[in-house]
Image (cartoon, rainbow, N blue to C red):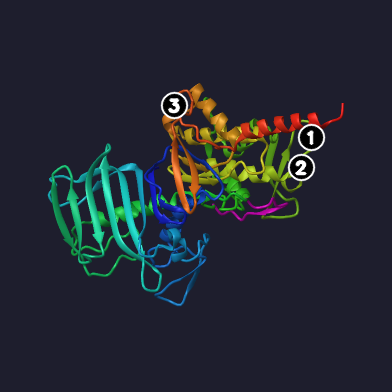
Amino acid sequence: MLSSWRVKNFKAWQDSGAIKLAPLTVFFGENSAGKSSLGQLLLALKQSAGADAAQSPLNFGEHHANHHTSHTLETELDLGSFAQNLHQGQLSTPLAFELQWRLAEPLTLPDVVGQTSSTGIDELGLAVTVLADASLQPQLHTISYTGYQQGEAQIKIAYDRAQPAELQVELFQLSHQYSIKLVDAVAPGRFYQLPQPQGAEASFVHVLAQQTEQLLANVQSLAALRAAPQRRYSWRGETPNSVGRAGQLVAAAMLAATAEQRYLQFALGQGELPFSEGIAYWLEQMGVASDFSVRLAPDSTDEYQVFLKTHAEADEVNLADLGFGISQLLPVIVQAFYAQPHSTLWLEQPEIHLHSHVQAGLADMLIAATQAKQAGQDRHVQIIVESHSEHFLNRLQRRIAEGVIQHTDVALYFCSRTGAEAHIETLAVDTYGEIANWPANLFGDEMADIAARAMAAVQRKRQQPD
């Protein structure tokens, strides 16, 4: 689970500062205030660490050339060129980012010089700087990992392009430093991979890269505009990793979960339910549908149809024949519970196209998803939301006040922009759900509109003849 995220010299962000992340984190703010770009860089890191990614430090583009071959890789996320993503085109300033995350299981680092026993850590930090080279391609300059145990830094391993023949190691508790000779002075191929040490020493270097790959593999995202509903969905028994960036695999995910006989706890105080029943439960709780099913089309062996009832007395209707909002909501619910344990979900405007009542219900559903259990064990699914919904926030504050979720399990932020510069402010929410530092215009200037409407009414009445 991510505990901190920091971005420097990326799009609207000169420096976001360290953003503390909770099991449920929500970013509010103006349009074009930098909310989406915080998630975009994280998704670019996931894309860059993928098994099919080119051997390049960062992969931002849809057509990303592999410089070792003539092959061009098709990628899901297209942010354009590396140089285009630098804040105000600052080519001489590195793009920098810092990740910190709690490990799913405590980790033992073997072969650490100076330690009588292996070094144990339960949290990792990764800090990277990347500069544009002469051809405006990303070039790694520094990589450093820091390992923590119960909040205390234990070990730091650093690569610096200025000293390409060795790694620097610092053991904080022993105040001991040493260097590790490298096989060669070739720069790392990817942003998270430290170079190969000489001999068999320092095998922990490879363990760090594996942990980063595992973290990023468990990052999933859902775009603000989900795919339009289909009358039929194809499924041939595969198990997708997610519902897809646009939610296009939502039916395949539901069918795969059913085929695997997944049972989850979908709400506090409930027993664990079959996956499809849990999805139906939330559709009903949010007032969207009283019945829900996915069935094989009568004339097909691999095409399925999604049917819903809007209320108990209504006829079943194909998803494609219902309002657009339901098709946008369904992938959000499915993804929230379909994600594997220890996943991080980045949801862009999950409330889009939804009635205010349903927007409020989203808060309840996402709280439940972060608290869900599977086979009696906590799933530790983290959800990060970009939202413009006042109804979502109001319900979230209410649930904090009621004790349904602890205020320490929620992080709220407000993003704004001054000229080309994005800014972020922590919304200090207390145990009663109150926000002490409510920003001006968080959801627009409602009182100004009310006052202006009243004044306009008075003026018009005065102009009316007696």
Q: Is residue 199 above or below residue 344?
A: below
Q: How many marks?
A: 3
Callouts 2 and 3 close, C-beta under 8 Å: no
Q: What mark, if any, has residue 314 been given in the picture?
A: 1
The magenta stretch spans which residues?
226-239
Is 57 left or right of 414, judged from the image as shown?
Answer: left
Residue type at the position of mark 1: Ala
Q: Is residue 234 magenta?
A: yes
C-alpha span from label 2 to label 3? 44 Å
Q: Residue 231 colored magenta?
A: yes
Q: Position of residue 144 (x, y in %)?
A: 28, 54
Quarter assignment of residue 363:
top right
Q: Position of residue 269 (x, y in %)?
A: 52, 25
Q: Is residue 113 left or right of residue 147?
A: left
Q: Which mark is residue 186?
A: none
Tell me if residue 189 comes above or below residue 157 in the rendering.
below
Q: Are marks 1 and 2 in contact (CB under 8 Å)?
A: yes
Question: Is residue 278 at all visible to an observer of this figure?
Answer: no
Q: Which residue is mark 3?
A: 430
Q: Nearer the viewer, mark 2 or mark 3?
A: 3
Q: Nearer the viewer, mark 1 or mark 3?
A: 3
Choose between 74 and 261: the one closer to the eye.
74
The amino acid at mark 2 is Val
